[in-house]
Image (cartoon, grey):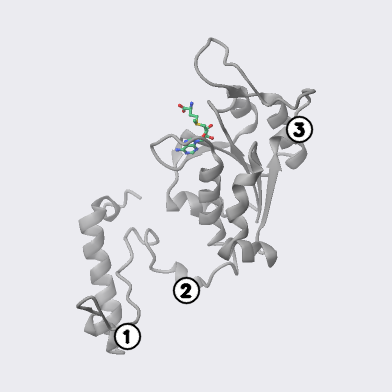
Amino acid sequence: MKIDILTLFPEMFAPLSASILGRAQKENKIQINVVNIRDYSEDKHKKCDDYPFGGGAGMVMTPQPIGSAIAVLDPEHKARRIYLSPKGETLRQQKVFSLLEYDHIVLLCGHYEGVDQRVIDLFIDEEISIGDYVLTGGELPAMVLVDCLARYVDGVINTSSLVQESFSENALEYPQYTRPVEYGGLAVPEVLRSGNHAEIDKWRRQQSEKLTREKRPDLLDGQK
Ligand SMILES: C[S@@+](CC[C@H](N)C(=O)[O-])C[C@H]1O[C@@H](n2cnc3c(N)ncnc32)[C@H](O)[C@@H]1O
């Protein structure tokens, strides 16, 4: 999978070089291309924002640099083009699964008051929000989406980690324990140390259901 990220602040993407995502890129399992929108500005001062028509606070990102960057990165409109926006559909696991069908994704990060509406009307396939709150820019939301997607790209993580995890089956994951057996007066549940895999599976299913009922009953209704 190839992901182009359009931003005015490429330096914000340093975390993508660390840990699992960094390794996945080195091993060429996923290609992440961070593109500076400013490089495409035809303004002599490389300006990429201007005052909003109609007045109001803040600046709006101008259409020309974004349109020119997208024309170069995805000339035939084969990629899925996504604008990270608080006005978009809230990101859920099912959306992540549906985006995995695309080999090429272009992510547009807004900043300031966002982008000129004509960018969305002309170039964008869908808008995605990472939650009902407003951030200073689309850079963190883009990293959230890239991280979610990369986990499911072949070879990025061990596939056994992807089964029975939270949201994979309309439920939250069961509690996890590791060594030591006793810590702070609390012991690891006996069943997990029994070696009886049928009993362990049963316990985990029960715990998963209990946790989901307590914390996210909406998931049991299938409202993912
Ligand atoms: C300060 S916000 C603009 C908010 C916009 N004026 C509004 O009220 O809807 C700047 C940029 O951050 C990004 N952003 C902010 N909150 C977001 C969220 N919850 N999900 C996705 N992107 C978000 C978007 O790219 C947006 O263009």
Q: Secondary structure at mark 1?
A: helix
Counting residues from the start of the chain, the first of labels 2 and 1 encountered is 2
Q: In the rendered image, which quarter is residue 194 located in? A: bottom left
Foreground: 108 or 75? 108
Foreground: 70 or 59? 59
- Residue sitting at x 23%, y 70%: 206
Q: Secondary structure at mark 2?
A: helix
- Residue sitting at x 21%, y 58%: 213
Label 3 CB less than 8 angstroms from ligand 1: no
Residue 160, label in figure: 2
Task: Tell me: residue 65, above or below residue 190.
Answer: above
Let me know if residue 101 appears in the view. Answer: no
Amino acid type at mark 2: Ser
Label 1 CB less than 8 angstroms from ligand 1: no
Counting residues from the start of the chain, the first of labels 3 and 2 encountered is 3
Residue 55, label in figure: none
List the residue tagged with mark 1. 197
- Residue sitting at x 45%, y 43%: 130
